[in-house]
Image (cartoon, helix red, strand yellow):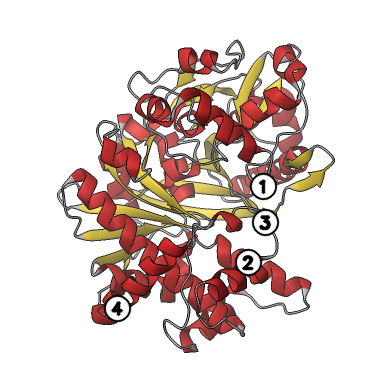
Amino acid sequence: MAKAYIAIDLGAESGRVIIGVLFSGKLRLEEVHRFVHEPVWLPTGLHWNITDIWRQIVVGLRKAAEWTKANHIQPVSVGVDTWGVDWALLDKSGELVGLPHAYRDPRNQAAYQEVISKLGAERIYRTTGIQFMPLNTLYSLYAHQQADPAALSAADKLLFIPDLIHYWLSGNTTCEATIASTSQMVDCHTGDWACEMLGTIGLPTHFLQPISQPGSMIGTLRAELATETDLPKDLCVVAPGAHDTASAVAAVPASEYTKWCFLSSGTWSLLGAELSKPCVTAAAEAASFTNEFGVSGTFRFLKNIPGLWLVQEYRRDLARQGQDLDYAELTRLAGKAQPFAALIDPNHASFQAPGGMIEKVAALVRSSGQQVPTSPGQFVRCCLESLALAYREKLAALESILDQRFDVIHIVGGGGKNTLLCQMTADATGRRVVVGPYEATAMGNALVQAMATGDVGGLTELRSIVARSLDLVTYEPGETGKWDQALERFQGCLRMT
């Protein structure tokens, strides 16, 4: 009999409510609701419009109830995954203490420098295993402490964004491990909060919740919400891999007998390998690789790369100028543009904040003595080629740190639909690239829920289900010589920035 698992998947610019239907060893996805959301600038900084996100989730849950009833399928559970690091505070009555800040809030930069100065980079990394980025929770929480210490004192609980949504779904508060690990506040060796380290810089820890594992039962749907959405009152609320990348990597359809690494491709690109224990060597620290908790006791050893954020921001800039080009058209134009006309460092600090991408890229290209892109095709090709070369650089670092070679790169996530970037990745790295699923996060979310309810036996079975459920696309490397030459120019751009 078919069973349905409702995956609420919140990305940094859009959200979806997707139903995963498990039947005869295959998973089928049905998207019932999609919505766009963006952070908003307020006098206190850049915030998430979290109540509007919740309103859209409720709309999606109503549609999920309608779809499952129309198709005579019983919904079993619901779970939420989101982007990492961002958090909210609750007081003792369960009320929000202010709107959650968005991770690109510029106030984090000063806090980043101050915390590292006080604690020392080596202590932070050897304790947490997490790469250094100003957007990490450690620095945003410290910035909040400096700006509004009374808010932290008054807070009863700190919840990450998926934990907050799970609380609104069930009425129970939890803190799921994969999302907590993105904070740079968790001891990667013990799996618990690094309270001693946090105390050194004066951060309170009274509001930190016990950390639970992905696949944990949180409760059932609140009675009022069940009535409002027409979903069953006994619908289980389950923590999947609450960090979207954790759910996506769980759904990598790789064989345990192959030497594979993953590239989760979307707004961010995350390139790494799945390990059984954290790697916090001096080489890992120097390369700023991160050790995030994964599903079934695994660790995601990876490097963040800004990804298609560059193209997304460029498209928004074009729209403000009156040019409304979709991603498919931008990619088509990039495919016709001159190869390797200009290259940039996609991780340049100026790209972190939203807005002005056209001017930022132009300034960076101009400063390195290259020809500034003047058309959408040239601009997007510059971004995509630079991303592919960044993947090559980080793959080389990954293999050096772990002292092993990966034969296959599994690309999961919506960025896999960009066929030009996928072929560029194969060409630049000289590795076979296997693409799919595009909806890896939703598939991983739904199937981890199925693990929690006993309908899937474990991570190996989960991946077998994913592999049976879709047709994978393979890209073979070609023309690697041109990419070898481009790499020298790319590395020169890195040295200049």
Q: Position of residue 50 (x, y in %)?
A: 73, 38
Q: Amino acid at mark 4?
A: Gln
Q: CA distance from mark 1 to mark 3?
A: 37 Å
The residue identified by callout 2 is: 360
The residue identified by callout 3 is: 354
Q: Nearer the viewer, mark 1 or mark 2?
A: 2
**Along the horizontal axis of the image, is 445 left or right of 15?**
left
Q: CA distance from mark 2 to mark 4?
A: 25 Å
The residue identified by callout 1 is: 66
Q: Nearer the viewer, mark 1 or mark 3?
A: 3
Q: Amino acid at mark 3?
A: Pro
Tell me which residue sits at (78%, 28%) in the image.
98
Q: Amino acid at mark 2?
A: Lys
Q: Nearer the viewer, mark 2 or mark 3?
A: 2
Is 60 or 120 nearer to us in this picture? 120
> Which comes before the other along the chain, label 1 or label 2?
1
Q: Residues within 10 Å of mark 3 (few under 14, many from 20)?
A: few
The residue identified by callout 4 is: 485
Q: Residues within 10 Å of mark 2 (few under 14, many from 20)?
A: some
Tell me which residue sits at (20%, 55%) in the image.
406
Q: Position of residue 269 (x, y in %)?
A: 45, 55
Is 471 or 285 nearer to us in this picture? 285
Q: Position of residue 237 (x, y in %)?
A: 55, 28
Q: Secondary structure at mark 3?
A: loop
Q: Residues within 10 Å of mark 4 (few under 14, many from 20)?
A: few
The N terminus lies in quadrant: top left
> Which comes before the other along the chain, label 1 or label 3?
1
> Which comes before the other along the chain, label 2 or label 4?
2
Q: Position of residue 91 (x, y in %)?
A: 74, 15
Q: Relative to residue 269, is residue 20 depicted above or below?
A: above
Q: Secondary structure at mark 2?
A: helix
